[in-house]
Image (tube, rainbow, N blue to C red):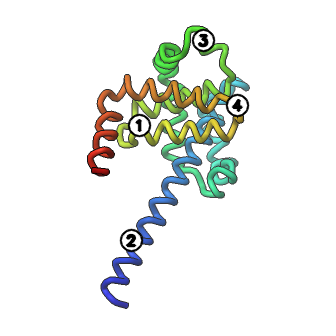
Amino acid sequence: MTEKSDVSAGKRKTSRTRRRATVRHSAARLAAVQALYQIDFSDSPVNTVIEEFRLHRLGAADAEVSGGAKANDVLFQELVRGAISRQDEIDTHISNALDPAWPLERIAIVMQCILRVGTFELISRFDVPARVVVKEFVDLAHSFFSGGEPGMVNGVLDKLAHQLRPGELETSLEQQENSSE
């Protein structure tokens, strides 16, 4: 094998590994939303729901969305525990971003869960670009809703991204514009 083909094979492997990690992160986000829904709906203890998901559901967290990939367990637990432990703070952020005609309590529980996990990721996971967080949760909303809800998720999380990570979105837009010149 030539040096050039070795480099090419290495790039393909890295690209494949990166895609697999992305799919596992997407599956973890989906599972976290589902776990929050279960906790809210059944009033089950957080640790019980997390353990149930880890034992019975993480490997199969919505195969349609994840392509059958096993969810990233560490990310799943971080998202669930974080969204629950910081729920009051998160709900305040979401409520401030919502139109006053749509208080958080009026929104479907699944939407609340999507917004809570997305907001938690914006306020705590600075290793993940804000644009990625917004896109991931808009995609998740499309998994559950066919109406205007994904647009609402986009609007709320984009507004929060600008508030919680000032400058990040503008910087990335400037970089895109500069690279296209």
Eye-nearest disc, 4 or 3: 4
Q: Which mark is residue 130?
A: 1
Of the residues shown, which amino acid type is indicated by label 4? Gly
Under circle 3, the secondary element is: loop
Within 10 Å of disc 1 (Cα), the crowding (few <14, some 14-19, many 20+) is many
Give residue 24's position: percent from left, percent from top: 54, 53
Residue at x 51% of width, y 24% of height: 156
Q: Residue under circle 2?
A: 11
Give the mark nearer the N terminus: 2 vs 1. Answer: 2
Residue depicted at 67% across the width and 14% down the height: 106
Q: Is residue 179 left or right of residue 156?
A: left
Give the distance between the C-alpha atoms of the residues marked 4 and 3, in whole angstroms: 19 Å
Res 48 quadrant in image: top right
Please say if 131 is above or below 55: above
Amino acid type of the residue tagged 2 in the rendering = Lys
The residue labelled by disc 3 is 103
Mark 3 Cα-neighbour bin, 10 Å: few <14, some 14–19, many ≥20: few
Q: Residue 126 location, x and y as percent?
A: 35, 37
Q: Residue at x 61, y 40 (%)?
A: 140
Q: Position of residue 175 (x, y in %)?
A: 28, 44
Label disc, if present, on residue 147 of the rendered structure: 4
In the rendered structure, which disc, 1 or 3, sits on the residue that comes first in sequence?
3
